[in-house]
Amino acid sequence: MAEGDMIITLGENLTEEQKNMLLSEMNAPENAQIITVSNEEEHKYLGNYIAKPRIGTRAISSSAITIGAPGSGLEVETKNIDWVTDEMYINALITAGVKDAKIYITAPITVSGTAALTGLIKAYEVSTDQIIPEDVKQAANEEMVETAELGESIGNENAAALIAKIKEEIAQNAPKTDADLRALIEQAANELGITLTEQEILSLIDLFNKLKDLNIDWSQVGEQINIAKDKITKFLESEEGQGFLESLKQFFASLIDAIKAFFSK
């Protein structure tokens, strides 16, 4: 597929009305390629990591991937997703080898969002004609769930930032032993001001040991993470970003003025 082409994944259990609503929401072109994701596939890739009731019995979350220019990195936007964050998707997709795409994830009702990764990886394989190894797919799903669960105790943004930082460090200097990996994790957490329990550290050691043993292109992982960070920096430096910061400053200034006025009365 060429830059700008869109490929769509739809949950198998959507009604026709829901399908049409989501296609309209995605601004899907008439010739967009559509892939169906089944609940059976969700259980195949998530069943080892989260309880079956959370996966459920229906596949409804859907997504659209628009192919980006080489080197553009990943962008993710979500709607009606309440457990997995944009950054968590980016992290897991980078692990799976997905790159250079704009991704929109949605559902007709609020859902956890865990199943969307299955469809995204499936769509990426079709769009690029590249097969992602099964063990890498499993690892990406495990990483997404692990990050979401970690987010429940340290906050979603902290969890996603920590996973990204650990990956970045591994890409630069791969640890050789469990002790090295533990030191890397603890240092990354310390630099981000995050406190981890011993169980959380052990879970991360286990996860990253699995990732280290897979055929993952860590140089590409580091590159994609850098692009994702660069986009945030560029936004803040851009005219739009500066306008956002200025409006934020004005908001707090007016808030302080209002508080002063209240107490002066």
Image (spheres, rainbow, N blue to C red):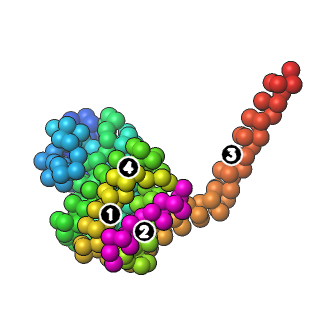
| Dot label at residue 59 | none
User: Is 247 situated left or right of 8 in this image?
Assistant: right
Residue name at image x 59 percent, y 64 percent: 234
| SS at badge 3 | helix
Q: Are marks 3 and 1 in contact (CB under 8 Å)?
A: no
Residue assigned mark 3: 248
**Which x, y percent locates residue 248?**
68, 45
Q: In the orientation shown, which residue stands out farthest toward the top?
A: 265
Magenta run includes residue 192: yes
- Amino acid at pointer 2: Ala
Q: Specify whether residue 130 is in view.
A: yes
Residue 262, quarter of picture: top right
Q: Disc 2 marks which residue?
A: 183
Q: Give the Cα distance between marks 3 and 2.
A: 38 Å
Q: CA distance from mark 1 to mark 2?
A: 10 Å
Observer-nearest of 232 and 125:
232
Residues shaded magenta? 176-193
Q: Amino acid at mark 3?
A: Leu
| Alpha-carbon span between mark 2 and mark 4 | 19 Å
As rendered, which of 31 and 84 lies closer to the eye? 84
Q: Quadrant of residue 216?
A: bottom left
- Mark 1 neighbour density, 10 Å: few (under 14) some (14–19) many (20 or more): some
| Residue 174 place in picture, x, y as percent | 37, 77
Q: Are marks 3 and 2 in contact (CB under 8 Å)?
A: no
User: Who is closer to the viewer here, 227 or 210?
Assistant: 210
Residue at 34 percent of width and 47 percent of height: 149
In the rendered image, the residue lying farthest to the right is: 264
Residue 150 - label: 4
